[in-house]
Amino acid sequence: MNPIGVAVLGMGNVGAEVVRILQENATDLEARVGAPLELRGVAVRDVSRSRGVDPALLTDDPLELVQRDDVDLVVELIGGIELPRKLIRTALDAGKSVVSANKALLADYTGELAAAAADAGVDLYFEASVAGAIPVIRPLMQSLAGDVVNRVAGIVNGTTNFILSAMDETGANYMDVLTEAGRLGYAEADPTADVEGYDAAAKAAILASIAFHSRVTASDVYREGITAITAQDLQSAKQLGCTIKLLSICERIVDAEGAQQVSARVYPALVPLEHPLATVNGAFNAVVVEAENAGRLMFYGQGAGGAPTASAVLGDLVMAARNRVYGGRGPLESTYASLPAAPIGKVPTRYYVSMQVADRPGVLSAVANEFSRRDVSISTVRQEGGGGLTDGPDGARLVVVTHRAPDAALSETVAALKELDVVLNVASVLRLEGTNE
Ligand code: NDP
Ligand code: HSE
């Protein structure tokens, strides 16, 4: 068979591992594809740096590389939005299949890029864009194509899971652990996309689109990060038999009239210790899929890092190359259901509210009244500290956990609590997930 020409755009954490595997496993890959995969060029910013590849293959002109006649498949591992968008469009329009790990781009532009791939009759694969090495996009798109998925929830950001796990284990505060995560190479120089939840939100948009056959973009995803989580929150979580995880949740919501919507949301939440996601620690990721007939499926593994992510990229590359050799193509994007995005206010959630209150008679009923006025049922109340008889300057700490209620009712209750004279401050508000109540 004629060799398949491959261009790799970017030779950083992931690209360097893709190039290494392409070179080291060339014989096996040829046998699996049915034709040799030949590396025709590698685009980088700095061509003068020595890397584990023939320097003659390096170029700082990725646009020229993707247009070359001897390139059949393009692997985009540069990151960012506008440049890779242009490179991928150019490659697809020229009839070349594309593999990308770029979740930030795919969260917003899968529609445009998938349409270009469909027009050209080529593949656009992006398994590595969500949860690194863990196969989750292909199972959703292919293995569960005959089922009805109702929920996809998980931990899809390794950096924040490392931070929250370390805070839980050591009792350290957020800033100290963030510094440690940077030192160990988990957190990037600018960790904003991870710690503010943007990375997890992009992944939620990709998962929700596939799971619910609908177009969901990053702006449809409700997002909160982990920067406000304190060591005290993790301590309180422990006392409630929980830990705290940054969750990406994609859920089918059905209202009283039977109308369906998609809720995609990212926030730090209390998770009971007996829930499978509570045991996912360090930089690991896990995704739990609930489907009508398959039941509950859990995918677990390394969600980031060069070699694990490259494994997923190579899987896509082999699929795209096989299609080139034997004809045919992978499944087309499916958005036929067109479910609208549900606003967070409509989503039923449970709240944990921790507040500092005056420690005197009547405080509890004033607090409880704000919940009942909005039809929010309280599940548990716990008081920590305070003498019970005096109204000292620090008062007492009151922790309330609710039953499920519309998120809007819960957030209005919290706003009202902040206005009460007896509430000195609302120290933290978190949602509680992974329970049946
Ligand atoms: P890096 O920043 O490590 O690497 C980026 C690469 O792109 C570098 O080799 C850089 O060149 C090259 N590059 C940047 N700009 C240009 C340009 N204008 N022209 C040519 N080359 C350019 O990124 P990662 O490998 O970490 O990530 C790559 C992609 O994979 C991103 O989309 C990321 O979101 C995604 N991803 C990453 C994961 C991870 O664990 N790192 C996991 C899952 C997905 P130079 O080397 O000269 O600087
Ligand atoms: N920054 C991401 C994470 C990389 O920490 O999970 C993998 O997408």
Image (cartoon, rainbow, N blue to C red):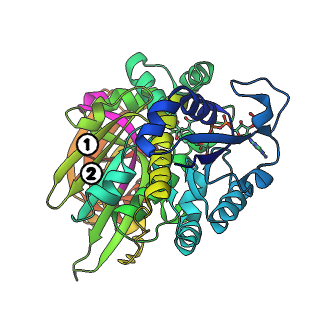
From this viewpoint, which residue is outermost toward the bottom?
A: 257
Q: Decide which of 343, 185 is in the foreground and name it.
A: 185
Location of residue 12 with respect to 211 vertically, above or below: above
Magenta-span inclusion, residue 241: yes
Q: Is residue 426 left or right of residue 4?
A: left
- Where is residue 428 shown, x and y percent of the image? 43, 42
- Where is residue 221 shown, x and y percent of the image? 48, 61
Q: CA distance from mark 1 to mark 2?
A: 6 Å
Marks 1 & 2, CB-CB < 8 Å contact: yes
Asked which quadrant contains residue 188, the reply is top right
Secondary element at tag 1: strand
The tag on residue 298 is 1
Q: Decide which of 288, 435 is in the foreground and name it.
A: 288
Asked which quadrant contains residue 147, the reply is bottom left
Magenta-span inclusion, residue 229: no
Q: Is residue 63 left or right of residue 135?
A: right
- At label 1, which amino acid type do we have? Met
The magenta stretch is: 238-249
The tag on residue 289 is 2
Residue in the picture at 48% in, 19% down: 172
Report whether residue 19 is seen. yes
Q: Decide which of 59, 33 is in the foreground and name it.
A: 33
Q: In terms of sequence position, does the residue under pointer 1 or pointer 2 come before the other?
A: 2
Which secondary structure class fits the magenta region best?
strand
Q: Is residue 135 left or right of residue 310?
A: left
Q: Decide which of 408, 175 is in the foreground and name it.
A: 175
Q: Dot 2: few (<14), some (14–19), or many (≥20) neighbours within 10 Å?
A: many
| Residue labelled 2 has its Cβ within 8 Å of some atom of ligand 2 | no
- Where is residue 244 shown, x and y percent of the image? 37, 35
From this viewpoint, which residue is outermost toward the top?
A: 170
Secondary element at tag 2: strand
